[in-house]
Image: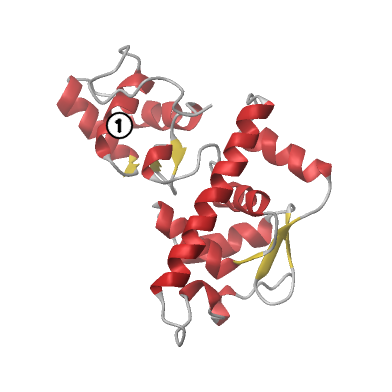
Amino acid sequence: MWEIEECACRGPAEKRQQDLLYAAACTAGSPQPVDRLRVMVERKFDRDIPMASAVTALAADRRFCWAGPGRYGLFRHGPLPGPRTLEQVTRLTLHACSGPLRLTQIHHWLAALGYVYRRGSLLRAVRASQWIVSGTGEELALSSGDLGLLRLRTDIAPETADSDWLLLRDGVAGRFADFRTEETMRYSPLSVPPWMSHGPDWRIRRP
């Protein structure tokens, strides 16, 4: 599903647009705007990829991880493989963690992974989702039932084998556990991690 081929840090295996972009992403070290990847391809491989073609190639190739509007990176650089929207990456996180999470917690988690987006966009994505439900305060959870899980898998990993899907789920869960540990250790017992705050901008209000 993601990065199953050898790294292209030394150059692309083929000269297809997606392979040139993948080689550029390998050397970038972090998620980049689409236009930045295009510039890297032009400088390194003397190939001009039109913006529209680059966007199409990046969105369709599952080696690339969406990292916010107009930004892509690789799994090794932080963002999660599969999701192409904030709503999808939130659903994947909630599924992997098997429990409710606060919206502020998800926001800081995504920021730590390298996602870049307008803060209000996450709130709007969550409000608009038919698969995410809000509990008390800011707590979010996936709607129960096999249909929600099937739709999640269809949306982000439609051609993935069961073993790879479990690997993805467990990998995200492990990353999130490490994130929570690091965030908790970063603050003294008298302080509060930012994801535990209750800012009014992050309260979920359903119409």
The scheme the figure's colours follow is secondary structure
User: Which residue corresponds to the image point at 21% horizontal and 32% vertical from the top-left?
Assistant: 40
Name, please, the residue furthest toward the right: 145
Residue wearing tag 1 = 26
Q: Is residue 207 left or right of residue 61?
A: right
Count of all numbered marks drawn on residues in the image: 1
Depth check, front residue: 87 or 23: 23
Where the N terminus falls, by quadrant?
Answer: top right
Whether residue 201 is visible, yes or no, is: yes
Expressed as whole percent of the image width and height from the top left, the position of residue 31 reads 34, 44
Whether residue 117 is visible, yes or no, is: no
Neighbourhood count class around disc 1 (C-alpha, 10 Å): few under 14, some 14–19, many 20 upward: many
Expressed as whole percent of the image width and height from the top left, the position of residue 157 reads 62, 32
Q: Quadrant of residue 76?
A: top left
Where the C terminus falls, by quadrant?
Answer: bottom right
Q: Quadrant of residue 7?
A: top left
Q: Is residue 134 above or below residue 11?
A: below
Name, please, the residue furthest toward the top: 14
Q: Is residue 104 above or below residue 18?
A: below
User: Which residue corresponds to the image point at 20% horizontal and 26% vertical from the top-left?
Assistant: 42
Expressed as whole percent of the image width and height from the top left, the position of residue 4 reads 46, 23
Expressed as whole percent of the image width and height from the top left, the position of residue 18 reads 38, 22
User: Which residue corresponds to the image point at 74% horizontal and 70% vertical from the top-left?
Assistant: 135
User: Which residue corresponds to the image point at 69% horizontal and 33% vertical from the top-left?
Assistant: 154
Q: Amino acid at mark 1?
A: Cys
Depth check, front residue: 123 or 147: 147
